[in-house]
Amino acid sequence: MRTKMAILLAAGSAAAADTVPPRFQKVETPGHVYDGGWEHFVGGGVAVFDCNDDDRPEFYVAGGSNPAQLFINTSDTKVSFRSETPDQLSLTRVTGAYPVDIDGDGFLDLAVLRVGKDLLLRGKPNCAFEPFTALGFQSQDHWTTGFSATWERGETLPTLAFGTYVDRSNPDGPFEACGPTLLYRPQGEKYGDPVRLEPGHCSLSILFSDWARTGRADLRVSNDRHYYVRGGQEQLWAMEDTPRLYSEADGWLPYSIWGMGIASRDLTGDGFSDVYLTSMGDQKFQVFDPASDGPTWRDATYDRGTTAHRPRAGGDGRPSTGWHAQFGDVNNDGLDDIFVAKGNVEQMPDAAQNDPNNLLMQTFTGQFFETASQAGVASMAKSRGGALTDFDGDGWLDLVVVNRGSDLEVFQNEPTTGNWLMIDLGQSHPNRQAVGSFIEVRTTEGIQTREVTIGGGHASGSAGFHHFGLGDLETAEVRVIWPDGEHGDWQKVDANQVIRLGR
């Protein structure tokens, strides 16, 4: 066993030497702090989306006890922003937000998560917003920390899911006082009362995903075992007429972690989405098992080198606390990497206080190695939400990170070598974002498969161009498998451009 492990480590080290980490430069931005009492220890998300139709994404960032802010993208060759927040978005008690075109009018709307009543805000031209008045959406007083959306068959409105955390009104709380996940299914052109998905185990991240490639997205829920104490686990709800939990009889493997965030991406090349789950202690990478004929993911954390259970810098040897996680090819070599935002909940003595973020780079052997310090993104702030996205249109993924108790951080990726594609995907009303599609990019190196989803992360969501790294390849073939299962034709395209694919 020791000999085998030594061989694996040597192979990983050799591959790491051939993988060039990116270099990020911190960008000066107007100040913004996510802060507040214990109800804002979690949350702190950011929504990234283009709201003024210039192909440069803005971002809307939660503030907790401080007002949330909208940052308008003013990037040219350098990434830059100005704070310009309309009154409808200048809200307190915001924990996170997700962009989604609910009414299919071509303008991205916002699902705003709060400690209090959640909001759906209708997007208008030039980054203006107004309340939705015709949807019938009603939210009660919740502590909301997760969101996801999908379009079920035959519906013109999306199905919305809100993941709630601790029930603050429970006199016996906070332990064993977890709120439910709330499912809003459309009733024609409006929403009625939500379906309560119970038991709830204090969710912090939720994601609709067509994990089996059947055309139906089911709802994955990542839960914080700190409050459910016993009897809880991670969950996957089958979106049948009456939603039901998958069980061991279906192939679901019981799993209990301090679940904070979900990232989903096909890393094995089999066309099925694998998952990365953040937690207190180790972060978990799980590979989908298509041979199981059920919703089975198997742990591959140590096999792939994605362990991130203790800080890699800063001198604090206590366990890490992971929050937002996201896949993205940050050096455009054709392999997805993993960013993880980290930070102590507040002053938890058993967890690291100096807990820098991780940037795990994938090598051509499928192994990962840590590069955050080398890349310049190993912040020691108490990070929460974040996003990898191209802010300046150069084809390289930049980074925004929300911090609790200190200013948010924006990092510009400095291009080196490596080709890329950006795919702008859309279809007609409803579901203009083509949520539920699968994008395939085929090269001599294989096929990269990307499921189009809304949700996951930690209170943070992005909408816009879909980024693919190509390495030194100058051409690729692209096709889309649309939400209803229709296969588009393969199209040969040149690298280093935005490809607009409409239906």
Image (tube, grey):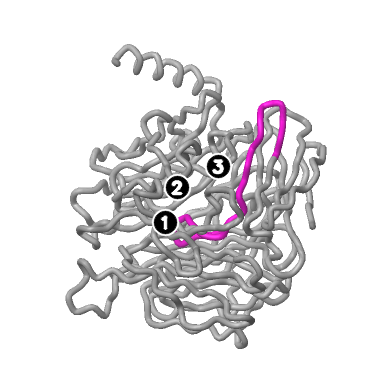
Q: Which residue is mark 2?
A: 295
Count neighbours of disc 1 (C-alpha within 10 A) and say few if under 14, some if 14 to 19, many if 20 or more: many
Marked residue nearer the N-terminal end (3 or 1) = 1
Q: CA distance from mark 2 to mark 1?
A: 8 Å
The answer to the question of whether label 3 and label 2 lie on touching residues, with beta carbons closer than 8 A, is no
Q: Is residue 460 magenta?
A: yes
Amino acid marked by disc 1? Leu
- The answer to whether 153 is drawn above or below residue 473 in the figure is below
Q: Position of residue 289 (x, y in %)?
A: 46, 38
Element carrying mark 3: loop
Q: Which residue does the numbered mark 1 point to in the structure image?
A: 236
Please tell me whether residue 286 is drawn above or below residue 81 in the rendered image: above
Q: Which residues are magenta?
A: 441-461
193 up-or-down from 339: above or below: below
Tell me, for residue 439, which label it has, or none.
none
Q: Residue at x 40, y 63 (%)?
A: 43
Asked if the residue at tag 1 contacts the one at tag 3, i.e. Cβ–Cβ closer than 8 Å, the answer is no
Closer to the camera: disc 3 or disc 2?
2
Q: Amino acid at mark 3?
A: Phe
Mark 2 lies on a secondary structure that is loop
| Residue indicated by mark 3 | 272
Q: Determine the CA span between mark 3 and mark 2.
A: 11 Å
Q: Is residue 108 magenta?
A: no
The residue at 45%/21% (across/down) is 12
Residue drawn at x 51%, y 62% as measured from the top left: 46
Residue 430 figure quarter: bottom right
Q: Secondary structure at mark 1?
A: strand
Q: Is 424 left or right of 302, judged from the image as shown?
A: right
Which quadrant: the N terminus?
Answer: top left
**Horizontal and vertical percent for residue 245?**
39, 60
Q: Is residue 452 left or right of residue 92?
A: right
Marks 2,1: beta carbons within 8 A: yes
